[in-house]
Amino acid sequence: MNIVIASDKVIPAHLYGGVERVIWALGKELQLLGHHVTFLVREGSHCSFADVQIIDPNRLLADQLPEDTDVVHFHFQPNEPIEIPYVITQHDNNKDSLVELDINTVFISQNHAERFGSKSYVYNGLDWAEFKMPDLYNDRNYYHFLGHAGWKKKNVQGAIEIARAAHEKFLVMGGNRIDFKQGFRFTPYPSVKFAGMVDNEAKGKYLNHSKGLVYPIRWHEPFGLAIIESLFFGCPVFGTTYGSLPELVKGDVGFLSNNSAELAEAIKTKDLYSPKRCHDYANDLFNAREMAYSYLIKYELVLDGRQLNERAPKLIEKRGDVLLPFE
């Protein structure tokens, strides 16, 4: 099958790059499964295992597809009709409840899909071979946060306070001690360290020495790569009950609550969670091959002339930027 993966990103990922790493892993796995992949991406992209074609913003997307394309997998919502079979992955939360998404939209968790009145979803997966294999039995001496710390909805301040309440050392990956992005935030506590934005190599080194992820988000996270990355390195997850978290964080790999005191108590019970179980769970369920197989099913449906949703997905409840409750 000739598959085009279209994205408005530059590949490969630079530092964190969530969507970029997902589509990279997907393209590589589809190639390994015997399909021919072309990335239609932004200028500056390159890839050793698949063809790369640079998007020209001044031309119709349909005119930029190779003639032998069987199916196009968009990772943004195109604003023009597409005549050949296609699917579209919606990676974020569209805030406008008046906008209908395309009938062939795929979401990245069940909760994500349900909030748009859809049943169509595929979990993200990563190429775990690109990560250093964790030492699941080494000494671990701090908890961590992983994500864009400048976003209030990620609630890094709540994560810091949970770690302090439990008298634990804490490492923030994805932010700095002083942050002006959404109001002034300064973290004076010496027990809290900041690593800034990290690439896979640095991330793996830090995660390999962490006791667990503290993730008290205050929004409906569509998926959360930080969750599966942490689990892969044997780190249980302690977070809130919003978005995809109840799907991804089962009882034997973490604890969920919207109460900071309960989360602070929970991280004291880290030894109840097996690092090997956390690793095996992420490795087995959220890998690139599982993701590729799931998308191949979607490709076959549209190739057969079927639609992925009964009706155009549309955000059911508009929340805007309102932070969800956290005590």
Image: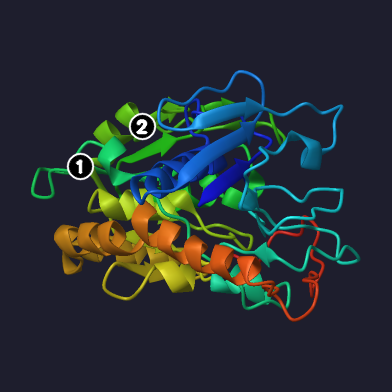
Compared to residue 28, the image places residue 161 above or below, namely: below
What amino acid is found at the position of numbered circle 2 in the picture?
Answer: Asn
Which residue position holds label 1? 141
> 210 left or right of 295?
left
| Label 1 residue SS | loop
Q: Say if residue 327 shows up in the picture.
A: no
What residue is drawn where x is 65% and y is 46%?
152
Q: Nearer the viewer, residue 5 or 258?
A: 5
**Residue occupying image coordinates x 67% and y 56%:** 90
Q: Is residue 96 left or right of residue 176?
A: right
Q: Quadrant of residue 10?
A: top right
- Circle 1 residues within 10 Å: few <14, some 14–19, many ≥20: few
Q: Earlier in the sequence, mark 2 or mark 1?
A: 1
Residue at the far top in the pictured view: 44
Question: Could you tell me which residue is drawn at 61 percent across and 52 percent down?
Answer: 70
Relative to 194, residue 102 above or below: below
Question: Would you say 192 lies left or right of 325 here?
Answer: left
Residue 135 x, y percent position in the rendering: 12, 43
Circle 1: residue type: Asn
Q: Please state the horizontal and vertical placement of residue 215, each as a whole percent of the image.
A: 46, 55
| Furthest residue in direction front, as rendered | 68
Q: Is residue 291 visible?
A: yes
Point out residue 290 in the picture as x, y percentages from the top left corner: 37, 61
Q: Regarding mark 2 in the picture, which secondary structure is present there? A: helix
